[in-house]
Amino acid sequence: MKRRILTYLKFSGLLILMVVLFAFASKRNEQRRINEVLIEFVEEQDPYVDEVTVNKLLIQNQDKVTNVGKEILVLNTVEQKLDAHKMIEHSDVYLTVNGELRARIKQRTPIARVNAVTPFYVDVTGNTMPLSDSYSAHVPIVHNVSEREVIQVFPLLKKIQEDEFLKKHVVGVYLNVEGNYELELRVYSFKLVFGKIENLDNKIRNFKAFYQKALRDKSLEKYKKVSLQFSNQVVCTIK
């Protein structure tokens, strides 16, 4: 009986000691100040948003984050502020045991720039995003397309972004008065009429085959117009 009581007292004492130590450690952790802010941009991306902007978004209650106690820093709120920025796709904010506040930032990826009254980018998901004050994206420029028409041209823009050949050669997309899309090439001056946003893979395949043959024949400079809008054929107009 005495042994049972002794064992019970030992376990009770150990439990109380653990609770006291945990409470003490938690109190010290709450009182510890954030001593450094580290920002990491994930993936290799152009700097559409810079560290200065992110630091400003990390500010709470008009004080720098480094002066805010951990107990009043709500990480979810900080992430929401970052994710609400129009250049940021996703953020992950966390604290280290050393008192470092770390923010991992995934930026949005623009794939085209629309030349409107107020220019804007189209991102990889088909949504619009404002131009950046920090960096100008090297993407095709879209002409004569309104914001509401972006959804129509987006499949073509996505193909250009995903295809290394098109990404290398196409610098502009233009919607003409006939409702057909034309592509502006980086090097060659002929008008490339893509037509409607349909049969994209077939049209791209036909253009690549034409380009490779004309390149071998050294005849690319001879053409004034190349049309892909007719099924399974490339129609060319000589200068």
Image (cartoon, grey):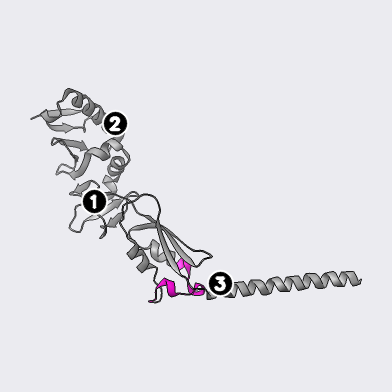
Q: Which mark is residue 29?
A: 3
Amino acid found under the numbered disc labelled 3 = Asn
The relative height of residue 33 versus residue 50 in the rendered view (above or below) is below
Q: Measure how far apart labels 1 and 2 are at the Cα level.
A: 25 Å
The relative height of residue 216 versus residue 168 in the rendered view (above or below) is above
Viewer-closest of 215 and 154:
215
| Among numbered discs 3 and 1, the one appearing first in the sequence | 3
Question: Mark 3 or 2, which is nearer the eye?
Answer: 3
Image-based side of 70 in relation to 172, left or right = right
Image-based side of 106 in relation to 229, left or right = right
Q: Give the range drawn in magenta.
A: 62-77
Where is residue 148 drawn, in percent x and y? Answer: 26, 53
Quadrant of the drawing holding the N terminus: bottom right
Residue pictured at 18% horizontal, 44% vertical:
174
Q: Answer with the quarter of the image where residue 11 lies.
A: bottom right
Amino acid found under the numbered disc labelled 2 = Asn
Q: Measure how far apart labels 3 and 1 are at the Cα level.
A: 47 Å
Image-based side of 12 in relation to 95, left or right = right
Where is residue 112 drawn, in percent x and y? Answer: 26, 48
The relative height of residue 210 versus residue 27 in the rendered view (above or below) is above
- The residue that label 1 is drawn on is 113
| Among numbered discs 3 and 2, the one appearing first in the sequence | 3
Residue 65 lies within the magenta run? yes
Where is residue 20 drawn, in percent x and y? Answer: 67, 75
Which residue reaches farthest right? Answer: 1
Amino acid found under the numbered disc labelled 1 = Arg
User: Is disc 3 surrounded by few (<14), some (14 to 19) or many (20+) residues within 10 Å?
Assistant: some
| Among numbered discs 1 and 2, the one appearing first in the sequence | 1
Q: Which mark is residue 202?
A: 2
